Image: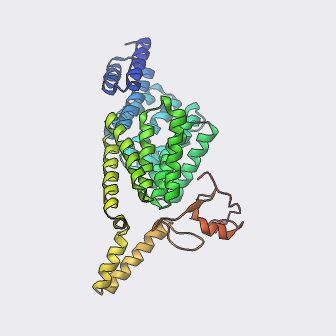
């Protein structure tokens, strides 16, 4: 299969994929991969296969094609191809929760400065690295990466990247229990899908709806949560995205649990352990549990640098500064115009997030 025929078959697969004929598209692309003698065409069809398997939640297959793609990039000896293939390796490992590998591959991408593709992909690299840091509960570094990704999206008018970053920020703020921001960002993502996403994959709509469902549930708006989760599940079923289906099922379970007893969600492990140790009079175990809890808070820097109270125990409005340190909003307002108490930077003007 020559260069022109390879290009035609790739376009045929894209047309099928955009028409939601996913399995037919995959068969076309696999035939190209088997028969094409054009290395650049093989690289491109591998990119199509990586994206398709990512959107279907087939992450092991995604990684398999990413490994083949980087071998093809080395064969082509083109730094642009190599940068793109390292990003796909990073994204594959991110989906498989291999977060240290993700960070390592992302750093490799960022070190390959000067190529045409690297300048276009830096936003995606920063997003993938931020998701990895969030998976490792390294919150400040995660926020720094999301800030960078959002700046790239704004500077390049990349609405699709902005949508993805907003979903990640929704997840970020849900984890540290600022549920107002956890709702704001996926709502922004949903607006971007409605305004610009006519030609996008439905996966972007599904992502925004799922993160909205999580935030609505945390805020006690269970009817809204159910509507969003049902919309996300419908798309996940249509695309055969089993990981997203699993997340939606968990969200459904939490919604139904909350409907039965909203207060049940507040019974945290910390409170349970404390009650057990107190009733048994086990003061040493109680003390050890409290110490470990606060050590964890210190390690993850999950505390407000102004009032000293931990962040992430209950719903609180938070504000991030340009230095990516975050505080209770009420503490920043009381602080006036003084600088960040963590790093002593003078500016307290809020950043993107």
Q: Give the residue displayed 33% in from the left and 17% down from the top.
A: 35
Q: Position of residue 12 (x, y in %)?
A: 40, 18
Quadrant of the rendered image containing residue 16? top left
Height in image: 2 above or below 199?
A: above
Instruction: Pick the residue in front: 140 or 334.
Output: 334
Q: Give the residue displayed 53% in from the left and 55% down from the top.
A: 181
Instruction: Pick the residue in front: 61 or 251.
Output: 251
- Position of 111 compared to 220: left or right? right
Q: Position of residue 269 (x, y in %)?
A: 34, 70
- Position of 260 compared to 157: left or right? left
- Position of 308 compared to 24: left or right? right
Query: Which residue extends farthest front?
Result: 223
- What is the number of callouts on the image? 0
Instruction: Pick the residue in front: 312 or 53.
Output: 312
Report if residue 244 is visible in the image: yes
Height in image: 290 above or below 74?
A: below
Height in image: 334 above or below 250?
A: below
Quadrant where the image shows the N terminus: top left
Height in image: 296 above or below 66?
A: below
Instruction: Pick the residue in front: 122 or 201.
Output: 201
Q: Give the residue displayed 39% in from the left and 35% down from the top.
A: 66
Report if residue 57 is visible in the image: no
Q: Give the residue displayed 35% in from the left and 46% down from the top.
A: 96
Q: Position of residue 76 (x, y in %)?
A: 46, 25
Q: Position of residue 85 (x, y in %)?
A: 45, 34
Query: Which residue extends farthest left?
Result: 280
What is the image's colouring? rainbow
């Amino acid at each position: 299969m020559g260069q022109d025929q390879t290009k035609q078959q790739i376009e045929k697969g894209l047309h099928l994929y955009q028409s939601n004929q996913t399995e037919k598209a995959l068969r076309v692309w696999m035939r190209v991969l088997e028969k094409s003698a054009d290395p650049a065409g093989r690289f491109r069809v591998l990119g199509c296969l990586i994206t398709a398997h990512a959107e279907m939640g087939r992450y092991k297959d995604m990684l398999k094609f990413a490994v083949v793609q980087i071998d093809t990039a080395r064969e082509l000896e083109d730094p642009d191809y190599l940068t793109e293939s390292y990003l796909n390796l990073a994204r594959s490992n991110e989906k498989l929760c291999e977060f240290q590998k993700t960070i390592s591959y992302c750093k490799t991408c960022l070190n390959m400065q000067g190529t045409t593709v690297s300048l276009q992909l830096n936003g995606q690299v920063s997003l993938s690295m931020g998701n990895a840091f969030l998976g490792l509960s390294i919150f400040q570094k995660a926020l720094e990466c999301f800030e960078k990704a959002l700046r790239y999206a704004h500077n390049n008018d990349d609405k699709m990247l902005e949508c993805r970053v907003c979903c990640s920020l929704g997840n970020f703020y849900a984890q540290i229990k600022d549920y107002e921001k956890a709702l704001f960002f996926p709502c922004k993502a949903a607006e971007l899908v409605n305004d610009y996403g006519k030609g996008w994959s439905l996966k972007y709509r599904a992502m925004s709806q799922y993160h909205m469902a999580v935030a609505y549930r945390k805020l006690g708006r269970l009817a809204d949560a159910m509507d969003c989760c049902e919309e996300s599940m419908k798309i996940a079923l249509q695309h055969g995205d089993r990981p997203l289906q699993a997340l939606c099922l968990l969200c459904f379970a939490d919604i139904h649990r909350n409907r039965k007893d909203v207060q049940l969600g507040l019974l945290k492990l910390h409170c349970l352990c404390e009650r057990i140790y107190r009733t048994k009079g086990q003061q040493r175990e109680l003390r050890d549990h409290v110490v470990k809890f606060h050590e964890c808070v210190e390690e993850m820097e999950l505390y407000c640098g102004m009032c000293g109270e931990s962040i992430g125990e209950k719903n609180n409005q938070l504000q991030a500064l340009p230095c990516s340190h975050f505080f209770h909003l009420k503490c920043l307002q009381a602080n006036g115009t003084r600088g960040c108490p963590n790093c002593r930077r003078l500016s307290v003007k809020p950043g993107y997030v």
